[in-house]
Image: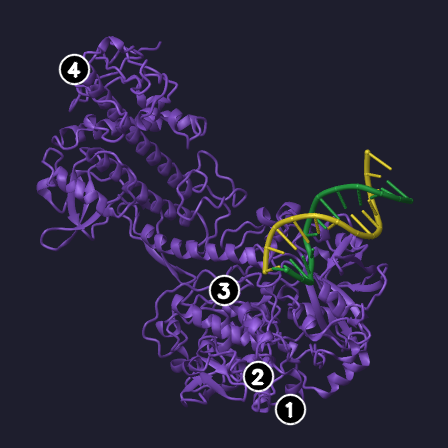
Chain colours: A purple, B yellow, C green
Amino acid sequence: MSSSPPHLPTSTTATTANNNNNNTPCSSSSTALSKKCFNSDCTDFKSRNGWRLRSGLPSFAIDAPRPETEVLVTCHLVEILNAYYECSAYEEGSFCETFHSRASGWRCCESCGKSVHCGCIVSIQAFTLLDAGGIACMACARKSFVLESNPQILLTATSADVTSNPAWSPLFYHAPFPERLKDLSVKSWSQLAGSGPVPWRQAPSLFNPSAAQSELQTRMPYEVDRLDTGERFSAPSLEKRKVEDFSEKFINGNLRIRLQDIVENGNAGIIGEEQPQPPSSLMEDASGQQFGITIPYKSISESNSQIEGSVNALQPAPPPPFTKHFHGSLHNGVDSSVDGHIRNGKPRTDARGRSQLLPRYWPRFTDGELQQISGNSNAVIKPLFEKMLSASDAGRIGRLVLPKKCAEAYFPPISQPEGLPLRVQDSKGKEWIFQFRFWPNNNSRMYVLEGVTPCIQNMQLQAGDIVTFSRLEPEGKLVMGFRKATSAPPSDQDNVSEFNEDNETSQTGNGVSTKGDAELDPSPWSKVDKSGYIAKEVLEGKSSIRKRKSSTLGSKSKRLRIENEDMIELKLTWEEAQGLLRPPPDHVPSIVAIEGFEFEEYEDAPVLGKPTIFATDNVGQKIQWVQCEDCLKWRKLPANALLPSKWACSSNTWDPERSLCSVAQELTAEQLEDLLPSCNLVVTSKRSKDAKKDIDRVEALEGLDTLANLAILGEGEAFPASSQATTKHPRHRPGCSCIVCIQPPSGKGPKHKQTCTCNVCQTVKRRFKTLMMKREKKQSEKEAETKQSEKEAETTRKKQQEPSAEKLLDDEPSPCSNTGSESGSPNKKKTASEGSDDDPNRMKSSTSPFKGQIDLNIQPEREDELSPGSDSGGMMRMLQDATETYLRMQKFLSSDGDNNPSGNHMLSSGGTREKVSDVIMLGSSHQDADKDHPPAFSMNASASTPATG
DNA sequence: ATACCGCATGGCG
DNA sequence: CCGCCATGCGGTA
């Protein structure tokens, strides 16, 4: 199997392009890009996100413009196949005007006369093809974009030169269109799709080779029949639904193309058709226009030369001896060839039936597949359909469920359930005989191929792989090929990669390879795509297909849409996260550009920057607040100050006066309080202000930490992080900082030893440590709050003179006694919760199985999120560190004025909340009898005395 | 018990 | 609501 792009940028082509053109702005390496925009007019070239060819070739593998005859091709390809046009002009859609200005392909809007370049990825959304011929710019088209009322408009398409290149359509799968263009592109695509490159329509001559041949002889080499369907287009848009809606209108409404008219008159205004390419090979198949194009458009003749020229130019070799005419046969939906397929008194397939073959069954043969199918013969290959193997199909039952319409359209008619044996040749030329039959099913039929197991096994197919059916003309032999599943979650045959940009292993095998199985990827599912998606997890075996509809477009589409949204979200946060990366001290990073991304490369691991709080001071100057590691005081720094992860007052070179921890904090507690929420981070706490402030801070840190996490992920994973799709549970969104998400996908990459000091591992460790510290802090705060609550409760009770009703459950250290004193750090003891506990806070603090111990030690046990045994080794060490930090924090908080004494967190909410006593009780008992007043904690002045031994 | 066959069921578009 | 089809399931060999 050729893993190289069989379509256009075959490796040969790409290589040739690179070799032949000294202007190649880049090396052939995929990792070292020069940064020159092909657009000579570009003045705003920046490193922007590009995408990778499905072949895995660098997206810039296609060369810069070449001689005029190739310009179109080249530019299209370049545009289509790569994102090298990364200038703003490209993104803004003005690329054509700046780059294509001297190229052919310009047309004028029939309405306003505006020149529009027809045939590049940028312009594709800018015009629509008029039914009557010519184009209309989108502005004009929209004016009359009343589909139902104006059947004239629709059929958009690309200009002839574009339509000649079926490869461009896939671009929509990949092109990182600016969001604002998406809708437009979708619409355009819809139209384009509607005009649809459908090489593959009903094969009236399927079992009538002569008919096919005659047709072939009367048609252009690249001619392809137009389908009177709106469904036979690949729907690369991000929202297939739109496309489908459109197609429905297309089919059912006035937009329906009158194929017959087109065919007969040749000028029905329908432009070229485009072969829906297998998404897995979209990019590779730029030269696959052998599917042909029918361009009844008046300019077809003039375009044909271009087309052919383009094709030839793109092919690694001169036009193959064979012509893979993917001619569709003419039919108006009731062609005679299927007239014999009468079942139940009605035509076997009516026009609509044939025209409504689901896109997922569209054949998406790659050039390589076709070539290999045809071998060196002059056979004409007619791709019929393809189907992704379901678990059932690939299972041992040996029955391959055939899409009904496909079966009825392309397989011999059968009238008896027993069907008939069907001889099928596999990609290696081996012949198999399957029983083609059907089952009555709900007044319908369910077609199956029986006895496919040997073949399936022979081809080493599994669920998720795709079997393709094609036909050799004129002999009419059925050929069954296959395509190993893409590395991406293929999920569906149509639009397998609507968004996924993974192109590297898009075709791990194709069933038409004649090179034997050796080239088959033995574990196609284990491949990890660029986005980190582990297909194996998704589609491995039956489980992946188990949910039978999970592989349908819809669900996948939704999922992908979500992922796409996530990608956007992640991208944003990624950028933010980037801001947290700091070079190691005294390190000057070298800048490397990888696929459009600029990276600072450090010899040492970059460190996570100290999270800071950006603000604007009273004079309007942008500043940031950073907290000293040691004294926990907040210091004001210039906004542009880059801080290491560890920062202390002593590093305050910006404000020498405050470079000592002893210097008072500039920020008042109130200011800090105001400041912290300004982080725009979620504050869910309903606690008192004092508590809230700290919570906020924690939240802020958490948020930052999450960002840092992204950095971690980005660091460890392939860039760009924004394209990473999580294979984690849906709950784990990008940015999720849970322990699961911060781990590299299982099975991905080499295992990291515990002693590994790689960036990822170190970062993860840091992350864990930070996590622990945060939790320590939280816990401590809760403890303090709880204790305070108890104190107040005690006080209240004392005041109420009900002390005797309380039962001492446990000793509790006094947080008050050690305020501002490290030496007084309490050996807090938790009280076991007895009876009901309406106080959620206390509930939490009471859940510890540990009593009478330093609460910090029980932290890991209390943390649901953390498995106690998850890191038994370093846990205590981290906890010790955390403890130190916590103590410092306590000290800081306590000494930071009266506004936020940590021990004074009043739990203000909750009607049953305990009042806080300011009296330390020794040996007093809790009042647990009263369920409305859950037992309060008693305080033990003897903090060092554990209650439990 | 197992495999196969044929049909039924139900999710989903 | 309907049709498709993935899969379940009972009957049979």
Chain letter of mark 3 equals A
Q: Tell whether label 3 touches label 4 (CB within 8 Å).
A: no
Q: Tell whether label 4 touches label 1 (CB within 8 Å).
A: no
Lower position in the chain sequence, tag 3 or tag 2:
3
Residue highlighted by disc 2: A271
Residue highlighted by disc 1: A265
Lower position in the chain sequence, tag 4 or tag 3:
3
Which element is circle 4 on? helix
Which element is circle 1 on? helix
Residue highlighted by disc 3: A239
Q: Tell whether label 2 touches label 3 (CB within 8 Å).
A: no
Residue highlighted by disc 4: A799
The x, y position of residue A259, in whole percent, is 65, 83
Q: CA distance from mark 4 to mark 2?
A: 90 Å
Lower position in the chain sequence, tag 1 or tag 4:
1
Left or right of A729 in this view: A227: right
Q: Do marks 1 and 2 share a chain?
A: yes
Q: In the figure, B2 relative to A528: above or below?
A: above
